[in-house]
Image (cartoon, rainbow, N blue to C red):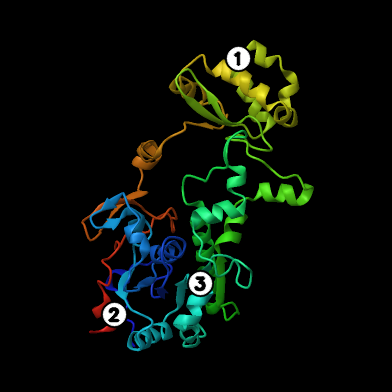
Amino acid sequence: MVWEIDPVNVGTGLPLEGLRVLDFSRVLAGPLCAMIAGDLGADVIKVESPDGDPVRSLAPPRFGDDATYYLAVNRHRRNIVADLRNPDHFDKILELVAVADAVVENYLPSQIRSLGIERLRAANPECVWVSVTPATLGGPLADLPSFDLLAQARSGIMGVTGEADGPPTKVGAPIADVVTGLYGAVGLLTGLYARAAGKPGRRFEAPLLESTMSALINQAQGFLATGVNPGRLGNDHPSIAPYGPVTTSDGLILLAVGTDAQYARLILVLDDAELSAKTEWAANAARVRDRESVRTELDRVFAGATTQEWLEVLSASGVPHAPILDVAGAIAQPQISGGDFIGTMSTPAGPVATMRSPLRVDGQRPPIRSGPRLQGEDTIQVLGD
């Protein structure tokens, strides 16, 4: 089969232009991985089963017939439908795999066996293959379906998220899927580089559980080194204080005082006699030890003015701080609203605003060349009638 590059992916000048990626994945982590390749110029074809990607119906909210969840991670790819249990369809897909540079999939091991996915891999040993799995293959959880929430629960992320006297809480965004998708993209790009350099490294695995656990970073390392199991601290940091929200007269403002020098600048700008007298808090270790007392004192001082007034006072202080914004506020802030991060993409229901790739290439953000497609919209063009 001749894989003709989609014209929208020709002449882009992007780093992955000319590379062909097949995306068999569903829901979020795998599609995000493939979308990153598409953002960077690859020609991506998404292969959906006749039942479709289940994320299409994870709504509300919707835009047209599609869930916005689907729209978020499915731009920059053509869409075909194929039933791998149908021998004729399988043979057509076999031809696509034979000329692909990379494949992204998130089949369970049992599905790989029943669908004959290893036959697809054998058709192109030089193809970079990225498998997004529930957990590392060969382990007891590898063939159990998993989702972002389950991974957050098993990984320990929920164990360190929430108030100390409250229940474990999930992160408000699908952090497990996102981290896993990013690791998948690292594997895909590494494989393409290794292949171009004549080095080994064709098959990559991005396991949801272990990828999510990697986001524990300092929390896991602290436990592994000391045996002390970290708990929930709400918005506090286990190793730094003050490093979280303080209460103003009308809301909250976030402080991220990471060094003793920054704390000294905070004391200077607050100009409060009682707080200045607490000289023992000049060292971070003492502030962490007395974090509750530090927070009480800071709340007392910050309650004397509004959030906006404190933002103006702190703006030139050199003290790391930020307003705590909701999604609408984050998108409306001048850094975002005045930049090019929010763009417009096409969808079956019409144009819609979306977040573009956060990456910039030689000072330019990759343009949005095409948006999500109807299920099977490109089947005839790619596979024939």
Where does residue 156 sit, x and y in percent of width and height?
A: 62, 50
Determine which residue is flagged by label 2.
Answer: 382
Locate residue 324, reporting x and y percent: 47, 33
Q: Position of residue 255 (x, y in %)?
A: 56, 30
Q: Quadrant of residue 368?
A: bottom left
Above or below, 174 against 304 in this view is below
Residue furthest to the top: 273
Q: Are marks 2 and 3 in contact (CB under 8 Å)?
A: no
Determine the secondary structure under disc 3: loop
Q: Quadrant of residue 200?
A: bottom right
State the residue at coordinates (42%, 86%). 98
Check disc 2 and report its element: helix, strand or loop.
Answer: helix
Residue type beneath disc 2: Val
Label 1–label 3 contact, CB within 8 A: no
Q: Nearer the viewer, residue 99 or 337?
A: 99
Q: Of label 1 and label 2, which has the lower sequence position?
A: 1
Q: Which amino acid, mark 1?
A: Asp
Labels 2 and 3: the sequence-earlier one: 3
Viewer-proximal residue among 250 and 280:
250
> Which amino acid does the dot numbered 3 rest on?
Leu
* Labels in figure, total: 3
Q: Nearer the viewer, mark 1 or mark 3?
A: 3
Q: Disc 1 versus disc 2: distance between alpha carbons? A: 69 Å
The answer to whether the residues at label 1 and label 2 have Cβ atoms under 8 Å apart is: no
- For the residues labelled 2 and 3, the Cα–Cα distance comes to 26 Å
Q: Position of residue 108 (x, y in %)?
A: 50, 72
Dot 1 or dot 3, earlier in sequence: 3
List the residue tagged with mark 1: 271
Q: Residue at x 58, y 46 (%)?
A: 158
Closer to viewer: mark 1 or mark 2: 2
Q: Which mark is residue 108?
A: 3
